[in-house]
Image (tube, rainbow, N blue to C red):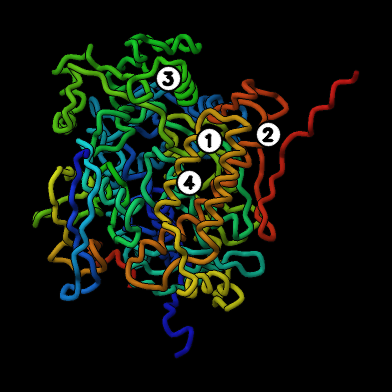
């Protein structure tokens, strides 16, 4: 069997009411964590919420999450053929799953 | 509970939809004229769209590097457009460009300088160095940052609204009176009453599998305008950027990043046998970067089709003739980012292939940026159709974002002064509100993310740079099938950041725009610029005209095709 990445992903809309989902994603050398999340939404679970815009350029800076407890851009963190734990940013207001409120206050719709 | 209790009502003079360079410039200009502006985007403000990704150049006849004239820029633009440019728009583009570039310079964008003047490079299709940039391949981010800062200086008049998904424009008596939206983080419906609305949502490159687009580039503005009664023109002309990065996997950089490398260092385009090949298609590059985008795209695809492509089906791009010092001098820290991806340009070529990049077509508008047929609706940037004809000249995209954005903001600001405030009523907003309140029992079983991927696949395979009647028929059938699976109501119910719902609303627009592109391409029985029909390989003078698309009573209508040829007399 070809190599896989096991993505353990925090899901939920409240910090104290979440759960973990685990999915295996095909591993291809050089791919980003965001590549894995996009594959997952298309092929396994479209309900997963993740915020991203520019996909690959690291220009929009929207895809900040934590991978194994470290804050990264999902579009530049590499997939590795092992279990990787994905969680929303701990210091931002949670919106859903991996999405947090990252916009500067003056840019939010109020 | 009242059905309306959850609705958020907003009132503004000008609603600007889309916060790339065109939308931000429009907002600034409208605010300078005294209007109250709401600047909305489906994602974050000033960080998405095409602008922030633009790593290359901006064309403007500044005349600082060498003597130049807007007329020369105009002549090059018209020539690249293969006979289809809307000359009034092209003229505005070229004449206003230097002023916008200098204004951005005063705002601190930091155009690259040499000997004290703003320096410029010669992009393909230009007759002299005319294209300004920010080092190192930082034009788009610098422009975005500068415009964001300028917007902050107008914060009294510009209200920013990120994460706002526009569902439909609100139309009253044939005019645009604002929009119906929903707030992505909460799912709440939002009614925006606006005296004038500017569409600055960018292009449609997300319709294609390989693209250089943000997720908000699914053609929203074209779909919103069409459903509101506006006309679209030139929809068959999708520009593919010929040398988008293909392999090895390169993350953290936009796939169009090889363009500035070619401006500065030339570079050699090679086939799978490591031979130069563009001369076989009528254009000899000779190590320079001169081939226009439509011709380069054609040459690369045809070479791969003939079995002489690179391993991943594109072409090689080599800078192996450049010394490490020359590479470092031209691109500084970018060389380190390439090294982190395992790419050493002194030792290896990279693989490149055409990638969906820009849309020449768009909303039909006058030089005041007013959308034809819909009072109160203005357009800016890539949403505008016609300025670039059948093929856009390199460097004109950000230029039109600035020039058309500024002009749209000015026109919208003037329009609101003679327009009374209007409240939105149920007759203006009923249909989109009904979509937002779709019955959860009607939840679709289809995976919307997978349907988007299917749409991107058929558009790439069948409505790409090389087209045939059979492929276009296949695309139209696929689009209809995907639409049937997506259904007429969004899945789920309003909630926090529901991506399945967002995918459905995105797909609704993408499917309509895909139809417009495929049907216009199907009609155009010739090859011209970015539209290459393998079954009609020649440019036909009878087709030196544009097609116009309208949405009437739930049907897409196309007009403008020439009369059928008379059958030969026997």
Residue depth check, mark 4 versus mark 2: number of the one nearer the observer: 4
Residue at mark 2 shares a chain with residue at mark 1: yes
Identify the residue at image location x=42%, y=70%: B492
CA gap, disc 4 to disc 2? 29 Å
Dots 4 and 2: beta carbons under 8 Å? no
Up-down relation of residue B68 to residue B404 (above or below): above
Q: Chain of mark 2?
A: B
Answer with mark 3 or mark 2, whichever residue precedes in sequence.
Answer: 3
CA gap, disc 3 to disc 2? 32 Å
In x, y percent, where is residue B459? 50, 40
Residue depth check, mark 3 versus mark 2: number of the one nearer the observer: 3
Dots 1 and 4: beta carbons under 8 Å? no
Q: Chain of mark 3?
A: B
Which residue is denoted by mark 2 in the rendering? B545
| Circle 1 crowding by C-alpha within 10 Å: few under 14, some 14–19, many from 20 | many
Tag 4 secondary structure? helix
| Circle 2 crowding by C-alpha within 10 Å: few under 14, some 14–19, many from 20 | some
Residue depth check, mark 2 versus mark 1: number of the one nearer the observer: 1
Up-down relation of residue A42 to residue B472 (above or below): below
Quadrant the C terminus of chain B occupies: top right
Answer with mark 4 or mark 3, whichever residue precedes in sequence.
Answer: 3
Quadrant the N terminus of chain B occupies: bottom left
Of all residues, the one furthest to the right in this rendering is: B570
Left/right placement of residue B327 relative to residue B169 reads left
Tag 3 secondary structure? helix
Up-down relation of residue B472 to residue A105 (above or below): above
Answer with mark 1 or mark 4, whichever residue precedes in sequence.
Answer: 4
Identify the residue at image location x=31%, y=48%: A39
CA gap, disc 4 to disc 3? 24 Å
Which mark, residue B455? 4
Tag 2 secondary structure? loop
């Amino acid at each position: 069997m070809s190599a896989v990445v096991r993505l353990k992903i925090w899901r939920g809309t409240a910090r104290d009411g979440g759960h973990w989902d685990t999915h295996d994603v095909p591993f291809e050398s050089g791919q980003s964590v965001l590549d894995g999340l996009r594959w997952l939404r298309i092929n396994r679970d479209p309900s997963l919420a993740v915020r991203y815009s520019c996909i690959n350029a690291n220009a929009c800076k929207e895809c900040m999450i934590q991978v194994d407890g470290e804050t990264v851009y999902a579009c530049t963190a590499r997939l590795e053929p092992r279990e990787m734990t994905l969680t929303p940013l701990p210091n931002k207001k949670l919106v859903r799953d991996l999405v947090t409120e990252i916009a500067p206050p003056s840019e939010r719709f109020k | 509970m009242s059905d309306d209790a959850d609705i958020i009502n907003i009132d503004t003079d000008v609603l600007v939809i889309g916060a790339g360079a065109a939308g931000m410039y429009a907002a600034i200009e409208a605010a300078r004229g005294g209007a109250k502006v709401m600047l909305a985007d489906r994602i974050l403000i000033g960080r998405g769209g095409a602008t922030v990704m633009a790593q290359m150049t901006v064309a403007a006849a500044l005349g600082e590097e060498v003597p130049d004239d807007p007329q020369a820029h105009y002549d090059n633009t018209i020539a690249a457009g293969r006979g289809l440019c809307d000359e009034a728009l092209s003229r505005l583009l070229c004449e206003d460009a230097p002023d916008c570039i200098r204004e951005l310079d005063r705002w601190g964008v930091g155009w690259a300088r040499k000997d004290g003047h703003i320096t410029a490079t010669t992009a393909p299709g230009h007759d002299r160095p005319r294209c300004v940039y920010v080092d190192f391949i930082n034009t788009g981010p610098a422009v975005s940052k500068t415009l964001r800062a300028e917007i902050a200086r107008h914060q009294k008049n510009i209200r920013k609204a990120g994460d706002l998904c526009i569902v439909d424009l609100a139309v009253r008596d044939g005019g645009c009176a604002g929009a119906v939206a929903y707030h992505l983080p909460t799912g709440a419906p939002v009614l925006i009453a606006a005296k004038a609305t500017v569409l600055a949502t960018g292009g449609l490159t997300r319709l294609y599998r390989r693209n250089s687009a943000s997720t908000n580039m699914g053609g929203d503005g074209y779909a919103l305008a069409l459903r509101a009664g506006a006309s679209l023109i030139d929809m068959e002309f999708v520009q593919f950027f010929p040398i988008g990065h293909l392999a090895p996997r390169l993350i953290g950089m936009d796939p169009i990043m090889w363009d500035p490398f070619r401006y500065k260092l030339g570079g050699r385009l090679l086939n799978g046998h490591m031979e130069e090949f563009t001369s076989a298609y009528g254009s000899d590059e000779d190590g320079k970067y001169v081939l226009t985008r439509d011709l380069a795209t054609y040459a690369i695809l045809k070479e791969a089709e003939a079995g002489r492509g690179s391993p991943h089906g594109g072409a090689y791009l080599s800078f192996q003739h450049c010394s490490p010092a020359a590479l470092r001098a031209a691109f500084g820290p970018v060389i380190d980012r390439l090294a982190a991806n395992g790419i050493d340009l002194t030792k290896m070529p990279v693989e490149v292939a055409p990638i969906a990049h820009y849309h020449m077509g768009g909303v039909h508008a006058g030089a005041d940026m007013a959308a034809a047929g819909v009072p109160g609706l203005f357009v800016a940037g890539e949403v505008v159709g016609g300025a670039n004809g059948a093929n856009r000249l390199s460097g004109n995209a950000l230029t039109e974002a600035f020039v058309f954005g500024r002009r749209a903001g000015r026109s919208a600001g003037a329009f609101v002064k003679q327009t009374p405030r209007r409240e939105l009523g149920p007759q203006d907003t009923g249909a989109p509100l009904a979509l937002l309140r779709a019955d959860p029992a009607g939840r679709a079983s289809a995976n919307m993310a997978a349907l988007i991927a299917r749409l991107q696949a058929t558009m790439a395979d069948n409505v790409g740079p090389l087209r045939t009647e059979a492929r276009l028929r296949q695309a139209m059938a696929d689009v209809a099938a995907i639409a049937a699976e997506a259904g007429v109501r969004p899945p789920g119910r309003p909630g926090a950041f529901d991506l399945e719902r967002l995918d459905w609303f995105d797909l609704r627009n993408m499917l309509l725009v895909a139809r417009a592109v495929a049907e216009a391409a199907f009609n155009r029985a010739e090859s011209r610029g970015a539209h290459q029909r393998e079954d009609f390989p020649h440019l036909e003078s009878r087709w030196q005209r544009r097609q116009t698309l309208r949405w009437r009573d739930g049907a897409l209508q196309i007009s403008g095709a020439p009369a059928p040829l008379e059958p030969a007399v026997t």
